[in-house]
Image (cartoon, rainbow, N blue to C red):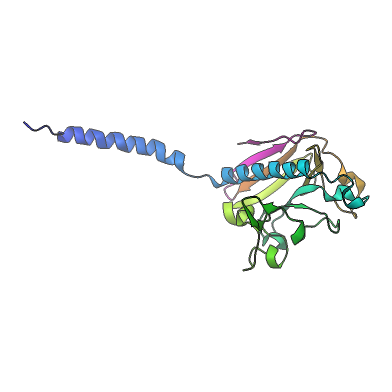
């Protein structure tokens, strides 16, 4: 006699597969907000890493060496630097100490040195809408992940976070024209809140003094 499945057994197997699919498939879907937070956390730590290995103390024999420290800057919605989307750039202001990134000051993508680590910051090769764009589209959080808001609070009063050679975080825009108070260590933990169009949010916290960063989903 040949062995075979009965109709009831086949139906039972199909039902079980359907239940498993209903449980497993949703958990494999991507969450753009969480992806953006994880990427940003990685790049904040990379900025800190650059500051640790590239000590700017006394760099170029200039008294303004402190303005050349590695930093990450978040360009706000409405800024032409990011094509009216939220984005960020990692750079060392080592040429003019003007507080803004130029092409030669932006960090290179360690996975592809032909790319610079900006999601849009200026014209030409730094303009994300240009065919000559040399940056990284995924650093443009609005275009890639649908992030509608990036808000810095707590120990951070501006859009720039800078790290020194000990990995400690500083607040504010580092440039010759800014007040000395903007070149101080952050006094309390810095919170970076990302929001999407549905008003869901996630917070990245950078600890004062140590610069340790983590995500609070």
Q: Where is residue 203 in the image (x, y as percent from the top left)?
A: 66, 39
Q: Is residue 12 above or below residue 115?
A: above
> Which quadrant would residue 80 be assigned to in this image?
bottom right
**Front-lying residue, 90 or 152:** 90
> Which quadrant would residue 41 be assigned to in this image?
top right
**Front-lying residue, 127 or 82:** 127
Residue 160 appears in the picture as rendered: no
Q: Is residue 62 magenta?
A: no
Q: Is residue 82 above or below residue 212?
A: below
Q: Name the residue located 80 percent from the left edge and 57 percent from the top edge.
A: 100
Q: Which residues lie in the magenta part?
A: 197-216
Residue 152 appears in the picture as rendered: yes
Quarter holding the C terminus?
top right
Q: Does the magenta stretch include residue 207?
A: yes
Q: Where is residue 181 in the image (x, y as percent from the top left)?
A: 90, 44
Quick one: which residue is furthest to the right in this view? 63
Horizontally, residue 8 falls left or right of residue 147, namely left
Count numbered badges in the picture: 0
Q: Name the residue located 47 percent from the left edge and 44 percent from the top edge.
A: 29
Q: Where is residue 70 in the image (x, y as percent from the top left)?
A: 78, 47
**Front-lying residue, 15 or 213:** 213
Quarter holding the N terminus?
top left
Q: Name the residue located 73 percent from the left edge and 63 percent from the top edge.
A: 122
Horizontally, residue 137 falls left or right of residue 123, namely left
Horizontally, residue 94 falls left or right of residue 179, namely left
Quick one: which residue is furthest to the left in this view? 1
Q: Is residue 213 above or below residue 79?
A: above
Q: Name the residue located 80 percent from the left edge and 37 percent from the top edge.
A: 168
Q: Is residue 40 above or below residue 82?
A: above
Q: Position of residue 109 (x, y in %)?
A: 65, 52
């Amino acid at each position: 006699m040949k062995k075979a499945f009965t109709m009831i057994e086949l139906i039972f197997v199909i039902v079980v597969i359907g239940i498993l699919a209903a449980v497993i498939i949703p958990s494999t879907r991507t969450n753009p907000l969480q992806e953006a937070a994880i990427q940003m956390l990685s790049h904040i730590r990379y900025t800190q890493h650059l500051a640790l290995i590239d000590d700017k103390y006394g760099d170029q024999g200039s008294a303004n060496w402190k303005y050349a420290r590695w930093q990450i800057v978040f360009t706000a919605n409405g800024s032409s630097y990011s094509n009216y989307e939220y984005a960020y750039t990692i750079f060392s202001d080592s040429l003019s100490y003007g507080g803004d990134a130029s092409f030669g000051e932006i960090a290179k993508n360690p996975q592809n040195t032909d790319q610079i680590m900006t999601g849009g910051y200026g014209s030409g090769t730094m303009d994300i809408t240009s065919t000559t764009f040399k940056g990284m589209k995924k650093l443009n959080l609005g275009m890639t992940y649908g992030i509608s808001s990036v808000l810095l609070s707590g120990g951070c009063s501006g859009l720039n976070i800078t790290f020194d050679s000990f990995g400690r975080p500083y607040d504010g825009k580092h440039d010759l024209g800014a007040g000395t108070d903007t070149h101080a260590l952050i006094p309390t933990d810095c919170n970076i809140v990302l929001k999407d169009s549905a008003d869901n949010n996630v917070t990245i916290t950078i600890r004062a003094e140590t610069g340790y960063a983590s995500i609070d989903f």
